[in-house]
Image: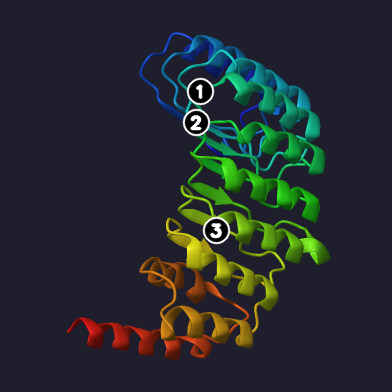
Amino acid sequence: MSGSIISARGAQQLVNALMINTTLLRLNLSLNVLDDDGARSFAKLLKANKALTALNLAANDIGNPGATSLAGSLQMNTTLQVLDLSLNPSIGNSGVNSLCEALKVNRTLTQLNLSGNGVGDAGIRSLCAVLKNNTSLTFLALSDVTISAYTVRAVAEVLRVNSTLNRLDFLGNKVSESMLAGVESIADALKVNGTLTNLNLSTNVIDDSGIQSLSEALKANATLINLDISNNGIQTSGARSFTERHFRDKIAGPGCQALFEAGFPNFSAVPQIAFQDFYSESMNMTHQNTS
C-alpha cells in the first residue's frame, strides 16, 4: 500500500478493519499522506492489535505529535518488532524523546529507522543514553541527520557498551569539519565492541586520517563483517595504505576480505586499481600459503 496517497481518513478506515484482524503481520504504508492524525490512528491500533510485527510509516508527513502518540502505544505493545519512521522531517527532538521513553520499557522492538528526520543533537543524545541499557534493538538507522562531533561520540559510546545492536546505518550525516573526531571515537569503540556486524558510514566526510583510525580498529575487532565507507573523502593514498596493511601485511583476520568486497568496490572517489592490485596479490599469497 506504499504510495497510494492514503490520507488520515483512509488510515482510520484501515485501522478499523485491522482492529479485529489476526493474520496480517507486516504493513507498508510508506509514501502516503497520513500526517499526525493518521499516526494517532495507528497508535490506537498498536494498543489493540496482537498480530502486527512490522509497520512502515516512512515519508508520511508525520511530526512530533504523531511520533509521540506512536511512542505511547509502544510502551504497551508486545508484538511489533520493526518500525520505520524515516523521511518524516517534522519529527524532531521532542518526538524522538518520546520514543526514547518507549524504548525504556518496550522489549519487543528490534528494528528502528529514524533516518531523514528533523532530530538533532539533543534527541540523538537522549536516544544514545537509552540504548546503553536497551537489550532488544538489533538494528538502528540514523542517517541523513545534522549532528555535531560531540553527538557522534555519544553514538560511539553506545557501540562501546551496548550488547545487542548488530547493525548501524549512520550514513550521509552532516557532521562537516568535526567528523574526524567522531570517526576516531567510533574506531575506538569498535576495538572493544563484540556484537556489531554491519556498519554503514558511507557519504560522510571521512578522509585518509579517518580510514587510518578505522584501520587500527580492525586489528582488534573480531565481529564486524560489513563496513561501508564509500563516497567519502578517502584518496588514493588512503586506500593504498589500507590495502597494504590489511592484505599485503595480512594484519587483519579473514573478516577483512568481506570488508573489502562490501566496502571498497563502492568507492566513487578512488580508482579501483589503487587497491585491486594489492587485493589480488594478497589472495595469491593466501592461496600459496594454503596449497
Q: Which residue is mark 2?
A: 136
Residue 52 image offset from top left, x and y in percent: 45, 22
Residue 111 image offset from top left, x and y in percent: 51, 36
Above or below — where is 53 with respect to 199? above
The amino acid beneath tag 2 is: Ser
Find numbered disc 1 in the image and state the secondary structure of the residue it sits on. Answer: loop
Find numbered disc 3 in the image and state the secondary structure of the residue it sits on. Answer: loop
Q: Which mark is residue 191?
A: 3
Q: Which mark is residue 107?
A: 1
Q: CA gap, disc 3 to disc 1? A: 28 Å
Above or below — where is 63 with respect to 3? above
Above or below — where is 204 with respect to 83? below
The amino acid beneath tag 3 is: Lys
Q: Foreground residue, 278 or 220?
A: 220
Extreme residue in the left direction: 291
Q: Colour scheme of this structure image?
A: rainbow
Q: Is residue 126 left or right of residue 200?
A: right
Residue shown at 61%/26% (left/top)? Answer: 103
